Image (cartoon, rainbow, N blue to C red):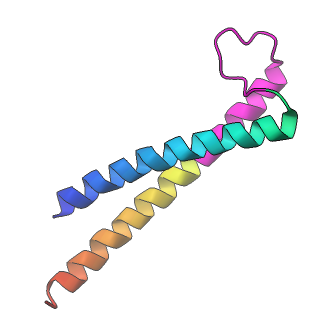
């Protein structure tokens, strides 16, 4: 059953990462009025804008990954505790 939780946790992490990426893109567009500097052809973007976007995107991605991993671990521990009660 723990394997199922790990697979579920990985799936949730990927899904949450996708949602987080889209959220950062939308917030960036609303805040700056420009598309996020992610494309290979984006030489019109300044290095400053690209670095700020990378830092924000990385911070959001790492936060989502840590929160998802912690939540998965808590679910595994809760399941292990309650499994013996039934």
Q: Position of residue 29 (x, y in %)?
A: 78, 35
Report which quarter residue 38 is drawn in: top right
Nearer the observer, 86 or 2: 86
Q: Is residue 56 visible?
A: no
Q: Is residue 12 visible?
A: yes
Nearer the observer, 5 or 31: 31
60 sits to left or right of 27? left
Q: Position of residue 45 (x, y in %)?
A: 80, 17
Q: Is residue 42 above or below residue 67?
A: above
Q: Quadrant of the C terminus?
A: bottom left
Residue that appears at 62% across and 47% down: 60
The residue positioned farthest toward the bottom in the image shown: 85
Residue that appears at 16% across and 91% down: 85
Magenta span includes 60: yes
| Callout count | 0
Q: Is residue 27 above or below residue 76?
A: above
Magenta span includes 12: no
Residue that appears at 77% across and 38% down: 28
Per the rendered image, the range of residues in magenta is: 35-61
Report which quarter residue 9 is drawn in: bottom left
């Amino acid at each position: 059953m723990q394997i199922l939780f790990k697979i579920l946790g990985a799936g949730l992490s990927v899904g949450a990462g996708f949602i987080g990426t889209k959220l950062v893109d939308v917030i960036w567009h609303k805040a700056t009025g420009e598309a996020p500097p992610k494309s290979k052809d984006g030489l019109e973007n300044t290095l400053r804008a690209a670095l700020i976007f990378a830092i924000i995107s990385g911070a959001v991605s790492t936060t989502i990954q840590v929160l998802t991993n912690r939540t998965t671990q808590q679910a595994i521990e809760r399941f292990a505790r309650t499994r013996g009660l039934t």
